Image (tube, rainbow, N blue to C red):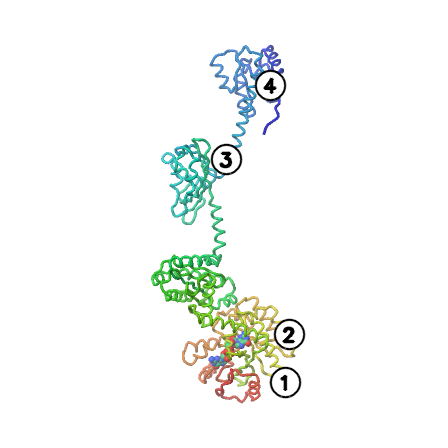
Amino acid sequence: MSERPKMPDVLVVDDDSTMRTLARAALEQIGCRISDAADGESALRMCREWQPDLILLDVELPGIDGFKVCSTLRRNPDFVDVPIVMLTGREDDRSIQSAYDSGATDFIAKPVNWALLGHRVRYVMRGSQVSRGLRESEQKNRAFVQAIPDALFVVNADGEIVSRHLGSEGSRLMDDRIDDRTDRRIDHRLDNRLDNRIDNRIDNRIADKQSIFDGIPKSLANLWQRQIAIAIRTGLTQHSEHHSPKGKEEHYFETRMVPYTKQRVLIIVRDVSEQKRADAKIRRLAFFDSLTGLPNRQSFMVEVSRAIRRAKAHDTEFAVLYIDLDNFKRINDSLGHSTGDALLKTIAQRLEAGIRRNDLVAHSGRDESRLNVARLGGDEFTVLLHDLQSSEEAEAVAGRLVATIGEPMSYNRQQFVITPSIGIATYPSDGQDIDTLVKNADMAMHGAKTSGRNRVRNFSGTMSIRSLERLDLEDSLRRAIKSGDLELHYQPKLELETRRVNGVEALVRWTHSARGPVSPAKFIPIAEEAGLIAELGEWVLGQACDQLVEWKRGPLDHVRIAVNLSATQLCDRHMARRFIDTLASRGLENRRLELELTESTLMRDVEDTIRTMSLLKEAGFTIAIDDFGTGYSSLSYLRKLPIDALKIDRSFVSEIASTSDDGTICSAIIALAHSLSMKVVAEGVETAEQLQHLKFLDCDEIQGFYFAKPMPADEMTVFLRRNPMAVTEPDPVAESTG
Ligand code: C2E
Ligand code: MG
Ligand code: MG
């Protein structure tokens, strides 16, 4: 910034008035404004009040002499830069030296050549302006450097550090623990700190730039621009604020070299650790699954394409294992997402540990690098097996994974068993591009599901047929629900004490045009997965209500119908209202309808479930828990929920007579239900022996083939009219359709 030239204000200090007058005349001629003083004290006072641009100062003054005045002024920061020209009477070395020692800018020996004084003053003024400019620019530069967090090293042609600036904590860390006496060379200093584990590739393009560095050692040229990583044992440093748990922290530095004279190079070392960490984080987010930390779908796809390239080049085979957890949606729905997430994490760990476990590696003779695990999303995982030796090898690994994943795990003091279905597709036989391979592994996985879950399937021709079969089922079911091509069968429940049939359970039946009857155990899960269950449920309710209307006219006014509800229906906030409306529109009392909910349904979302169930209960519906004993319900849930009855699962009833364990479970369930004022229904009673046991255990109702099989509505009507009161000792019933 240039300032407008201003004529200087000059203070003339001399006890001789003639001298003052002559000096004034000479200087006014060149445009200076003059003030004067006759002694040192008044000179100092005037300086305090009025800052001159230059002082012409006689050495010999009454009182304080000129040297003293000069040194006093120099101690004042305002006068550090003001040029002071001393008038010495004696042109001897000592007084000239004293003048400079006291801080004078220049001296003029008496007698003064008045004609030259003006030139001399102008020259001194110019000199002082230049040095003030320099000083200011140096201050500015120093401030700039102070503000830079980088480390700056000035290095000579031998690579020795001449001076340095250590800006930030990071750059100090880098320079820490270096002995200046033994290691003055910058390249040693940096190279000694490289940790070979970390990427420290040197930019080879450096060589081309060699010509820039005339006279600079080749080793230094490596510092031209490169990234170095330094692992610092924080536990040992003075600056140990960044303690990492392992006592070691990685710092990354970027070096840059700027030659600035022929013999000097400036090396800038920047701590880029933060930026590196941020980059790594972004990479993690883009390529890794945040829940499990496993590579995500994106990474998996990259890995598959890499595997294809590798297998092509080396003429090898590899396998894609597509893993889907069985019924995981139900866990998520019934126990909440936080439980689901925790279990997924455990499974991810098991997968990783499972494929790394020594026995597996040993069994398959492979090292870790040949295996990649990824999470595609939800409950779907994949494993890549490179360099496959045989197709059995992939199956063996998958089989082991089935076993590992399926081991019981506990979370929040509950035990879970989650099983996987795994599909295998092999490159190149099952697909030669990413899409085909992954699609076929997925199809094989679905094959494993349809053939019973918790198993491994290889992709093969039959596999795709099976999968098409499922698609076809889904499609036909959709159409069947739309056109009402379903039917309800009814199975009676016998009240043991009164020997009356007061209720029947509605069970949906579907006859596929080509395949014949399809079991609800097969198509209900399909309806659930395909999002058809709500529609199906509505149809069942409407149909059951129509039947109730018919029996009411019958008159079979006492009979209640139980319908099965799926979890999705219970989660629908408006479901209770719709049920109430459906019955009201047909003039039916709500107590005529019983709702059967499976245990897992209840725990989907406890708050929502309790609200919906309370609404249903208040409206007068009867609520029963179906398949009791197979889910995870805890006693506290049972107490909180408005439940009227428990239906003991068939699996406990079937063994009741043979194994004591199941007998104990049945009697415990019955005792539990009674203590909570609930009724107990035993499902799947097939023999007189089972019936006897249940009677003995004080069970309230039974349902099962021993008494009656599910039957179409008209047969059921006949059955009910036949006066079930007469059933004294039930006979096995002849098989009915269904
Ligand atoms: P669930 O509600 O536990 O129904 C009882 C199942 O046991 C019925 O099978 C019935 O036919 C069968 N069963 C009854 N007595 C015996 C017996 O003595 N021995 C044997 N081995 N089995 C017996 P089904 O009709 O195949 O239904 C299977 C499951 O499908 C039902 O189990 C229920 O969970 C579901 N389901 C059936 N209809 C519907 C429906 O309309 N909606 C929903 N959401 N689910 C339904
Ligand atoms: Mg049921
Ligand atoms: Mg049941």
Label 1: how many Cα within 10 Å (few below 14, some 14–19, many 20+): few
Q: Nearer the viewer, mark 3 or mark 1?
A: 3
Does dot 4 land on a helix, a strand or a loop?
A: strand
Q: Is residue 391 above or below residue 538?
A: above
Q: CA distance from mark 1 to mark 2?
A: 20 Å
Q: Which mark is residue 145?
A: 3
Q: Please tell me which residue lies in front, 367 or 500.
A: 367
x 45%, y 77%: residue: 652
| Residue marked by disc 1 | 553
Q: Is disc 1 placed on a helix, strand or loop?
A: helix
Q: Is residue 682 visible?
A: no
Q: Nearer the viewer, residue 440 or 246?
A: 440
Mark-to-mark CA distance, 3 and 1? 99 Å
Q: Earlier along the polypeptide chain: callout 4 or callout 2?
A: 4
Label disc, if present, on residue 331 of the rendered structure: none
Of circles 3 and 4, the one toward us is: 3
- For mark 2, what is the residue? 581
What amino acid is labelled 2 in the image?
Asp
Q: Which residue is mark 4?
A: 10
Residue 26 visible to the viewer: yes
Q: Earlier in the sequence, mark 4 or mark 1?
A: 4
